């Protein structure tokens, strides 16, 4: 297992962590101040400053990317299927322009939440089918751009509105069904926030192997959690044994970034430099 205690070479900042404090350009500048060399930007933050400007800012700062957030939301009613396909193709194109190593997929839940305006449905089995078909279709396009796709299983609390893929096993089942050859173009983004509770986690990480682990996200689970979406903890402030999970993914050969991704009303209210200083300190001490 790599030793992070003396530097933060392997820290990546998911830009949602400081989305309320600055735009993407301001975040890139802040990363330079703190010696953070890698980010994972969100599409809306890229759109807000313009793709060309975002590409220039990343390049001029010498930043790497650890992913691009996000594609997916595959579940919709029939009228919106074309919109879903085109939107995901744009995500691949943007990721390519920015030099991302993968597009992170949040796959969608029920159609009325994944793609607002869709006819409502309670049929989660139909949603699973659409997710399978949507990923398979997107992967065909992603292969032409040589852009891997990383399925992120989300905690089951998000099954209705964000992702009906909720465990590492379920994500790997999709990978095996859609990409049985393990081409390297389809894998998972493992976020400790979503998977720490799963009794099968260690077995499933071993099943994934290095080639199915494309990204590793860290934050912490607070007790109590006061807001289902925006009360994630800073690493070390909650109950997740982050090192145990990192040791398991690294034992499979994962040698990429520990990407800090914290959606938190508390941390969004603090100064940008304080947040980044704390991320670095916790990366060294508890990640
Ligand atoms: Zn994540």
Image (tube, helix red, strand yellow):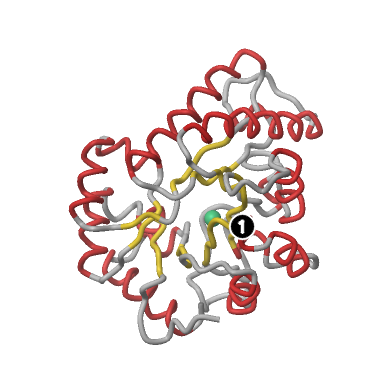
90 up-or-down from 254: above or below: above
120 up-or-down from 281: above or below: above
Q: Which residue ends up furthest to the top in the rendered image?
A: 79
Q: Quadrant of residue 254?
A: bottom right
59 left or right, relative to 133: left
Instruction: Point out residue 118 in the picture as x, y percentages from the top left corner.
Output: 63, 20
Residue depicted at 62% across the width and 63% down the height? 210
Q: Nearer the viewer, residue 205 or 153?
A: 205
Q: Quadrant of residue 253?
A: bottom right
69 up-or-down from 52: above or below: below
Q: Nearer the viewer, residue 255 or 198?
A: 255
Residue depicted at 20% across the width and 59% down the height? 29
209 up-or-down from 139: above or below: below
Residue depicted at 63% across the width and 34% down the height? 135
The number of numbered badges drawn on the structure is: 1
Ligand 1 closer than 8 Å to label 1 CB: no
Quarter of the picture containing the N terminus is bottom right
Residue depicted at 58% across the width and 54% down the height? 189
**10 Å neighbourhood of mark 1: few (<14), some, or many (≥20)?**
some
Instruction: Point out residue 136 in the picture as x, y percentages from the top left corner.
Output: 65, 32
Q: Nearer the viewer, residue 122 or 209?
A: 209
Instruction: Point out residue 148 in the picture as x, y percentages from the top left corner.
Output: 53, 44
Residue denoted by label 1: 211
Instruction: Point out residue 27 in the picture as x, y percentages from the top left corner.
Output: 27, 56
184 left or right, relative to 15: right
Q: Which residue ends up furthest to the left in the rendered image?
A: 60
Q: Image quadrant of ligand 1?
A: bottom right
């Amino acid at each position: 297992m790599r030793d992070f205690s003396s530097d933060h070479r392997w820290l990546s900042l998911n830009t949602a962590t400081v989305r309320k404090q600055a735009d993407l350009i301001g975040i890139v500048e802040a990363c330079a101040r703190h010696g953070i060399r890698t980010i994972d930007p969100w599409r809306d933050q890229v759109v807000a400053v313009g793709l060309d400007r975002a590409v220039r800012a990343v390049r001029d700062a010498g930043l790497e990317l650890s992913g691009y957030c996000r594609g997916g939301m595959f579940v919709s009613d029939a009228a919106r299927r074309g919109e879903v396909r085109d939107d995901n193709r744009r995500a691949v194109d943007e990721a390519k322009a920015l030099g991302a190593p993968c597009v992170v997929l949040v796959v969608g839940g029920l159609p009325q939440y994944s793609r607002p305006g869709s006819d409502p449905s309670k049929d989660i089995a139909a949603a699973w089918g659409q997710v399978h078909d949507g990923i398979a279709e997107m992967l065909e396009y992603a292969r032409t751009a040589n852009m891997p796709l990383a399925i992120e299983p989300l905690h089951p609390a998000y099954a209705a509105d964000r992702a009906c893929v909720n465990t590492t096993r379920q994500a790997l089942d999709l990978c095996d069904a859609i990409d049985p050859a393990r081409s390297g173009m389809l894998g998972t983004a493992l976020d400790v926030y979503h998977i720490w509770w799963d009794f099968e986690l260690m077995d499933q990480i071993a099943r994934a192997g290095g080639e199915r682990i494309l990204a590793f996200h860290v934050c912490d689970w607070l007790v109590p959690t006061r807001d289902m979406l925006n009360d994630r903890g800073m690493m070390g402030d909650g109950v997740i044994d982050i090192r145990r999970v990192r040791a398991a993914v690294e034992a499979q050969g994962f040698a990429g970034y520990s990407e800090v991704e914290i959606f938190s009303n508390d941390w969004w209210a603090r100064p940008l430099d304080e947040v980044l200083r704390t991320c670095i300190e916790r990366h060294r001490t508890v990640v």
